[in-house]
Amino acid sequence: MGVLIGQLGLDINPIVKSTFFLIFLFAVGYSVGPQFIHSLKKEGLPQIAFAAIICVLCLGVTWAAAVIAKFDVGNAAGLLAGANTISAVIGVATDSINRLPIDAAQKQTYINEIPVAYAVTYIFGTAGTAWFLSVLAPKILSKNIIQESKEYEQKLGGAIADDDPTMEYAYDGTTFRVIQANSSMFDTPKKVSEVENFLVTKGWPVYIERIRNGKNDIINEPSPDQLINKGDKLVLNGPIDTILNDESLIGPEVADLDLLDLRAEALTVMVSNKHMDNQTLGKLKTDKNRHGVIIRKIHRGNAEVPLLNDVQIQRGDLVEIEGRKADVDRFAKYLGYAERPTNVTDLLYVGLGIFLGGLLGALTLRIGNVSLSLSTSGGVLISGILFGWLRSTHPTFGAVPQSAVWLMNNLGLNMFIAVVGITAGPNFIAGLKASGLSLFIAGVAVSLIPMIIGVYLGKYLFKFHPAITLGACAGSRVTTAALGAIQDTTQSKVPALSYTTTYAVGNTLLIIWGVVIVLLMG
């Protein structure tokens, strides 16, 4: 639409483009910062190395294709941005071109070429990569990717819920039910802790929240040593399938509305406490601090982490929990910081991050006649990463709600792209006629060659599990659409385990390559 409207010859102040682009870059850095910094630990190094190699391949293949096709710096930068679906390269490369020691008219020519090459190569970069990683790559890696993914889930301790992760239920999370204790288990009185420990072996933890005894007294928050007699009514908190699948375990469900008169809360918590590093979901299954709380989902960056016993929690993860309010508040404090719904953004924190990033990007290192700089955009990206990581370790300040991050990311990028299109509009058709076919062919090569090499590197050099290799390829190329297609193919969320770390690395390096490609081609 920007290109179409640009045919009117409108003049847009470049400050508009720069402002929205810097907001977008800060949001990108803020989002990936926790994963990027925390992945620098020893256990994350293989995935970091893999992502770095893929990113270098993306840059190298782009440079080689540009040299072979005799593209100038503008088309090369647009090819890098579109074929690798990393739109931020447009802005970073534009900043770098403006620093080249050439006349203003030539700079503008190069800058106008970037969106042309980007538009020609972006569609295949997105759809072609998703098709390759979800259709061809699984066949290269495995004879039965679905079965191998299931086996890998079992290797990671299996799902902490005994359900099929490919299925979706109308109810996802905790539920409170009144069950009457009349099974043979209660022929002799049993302690609350004994019953709960027994139920853990049947799948998810199920907690006893209240008891109505034979005297019709209600016991709130029963202690672990509280005795349960046959005929007592128990309020059980846990997944509905675990509670109701086998009535012989405890007894049948009964109606008791007064006993269910309690408050429940669903809450998102940012993991920030140091003691949670390397804690597995399996250990949390029986952690006393978690008593009464169900973990519904875990989000790491823009991916949902599978709920497997041996999956490790990282600081910066967003954990959705549910249970009685008192239990939820206690467990939230144990995990880190409760992200209660708010529409308040710490604009001072955001503004300071963008300002300091701009100063960082303004620093220039001169080597001979060559000036090296992150550029303003690169500096803001790095600043966003650091500020996002700082927020994950000290969550009492710098709050930017997920909705605000989404707005900054999408509004910033789309406004920037729109202005780029409007500015390049008058020259777009001519550029498309001149280089369209060669750009498309080059785009196919740039999109697929790093992915093909990446599949074999993951299989033979890094010896990743096939599903981990697929997730790492998608993350390194920052293609969320491919992740969804891969998860559909594998019928598993295992690829998300490698997607988050490689996405953080790929998103950072590929954006910085916008500076490097200009230096290589300029």
Image (tube, rainbow, N blue to C red):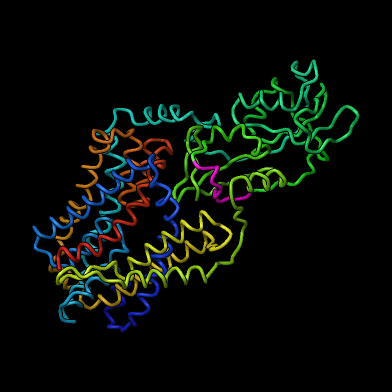
Decide if residue 505 is on the left or right side of residue 461.
Answer: right
Looking at the image, residue 178 sits to the left or right of residue 300; the answer is right
Residue 177 pos. (x, y %) = 72, 35
Is residue 115 visible in the rendered structure shown here?
no
Q: Quadrant of residue 322?
A: top right
470 vs 429: above or below? above
Write down the region rendered in magenta.
Answer: 267-277
Residue 98 included in the magenta stretch of the image? no
Q: In the image, residue 249 lies at what x, y percent?
A: 69, 21
Q: Nearer the viewer, residue 434 or 199?
A: 199
* Quadrant (top left/top right/bottom left/bottom right) for the C terminus: bottom left
Counting from the top left corner in percent of width and height, residue 10 is at 31, 83
- In the rendered image, residue 272 lying in the magenta stretch gets the answer yes
Q: Position of residue 159 (x, y in %)?
A: 51, 31
Q: Which quadrant of the rendered structure holds the N terminus? A: bottom left
> Quick check: can you spot residue 445?
yes
Residue at image coords 16%, 60%: 439
Give the quadrant of residue 458: top left
Q: How many marks?
A: 0
Work out which residue is located at the far right of the displayed protein and give it: 215
- With respect to residue 428, does 382 lie above or below? above
Compared with residue 100, is residue 13 higher up or lower down, i.e. above or below? below
Q: Quadrant of residue 520?
A: bottom left
Height in image: 105 above or below 351?
below
Q: Kindly identify the residue that appears in the image at 32 percent across and 65 percent down.
A: 378
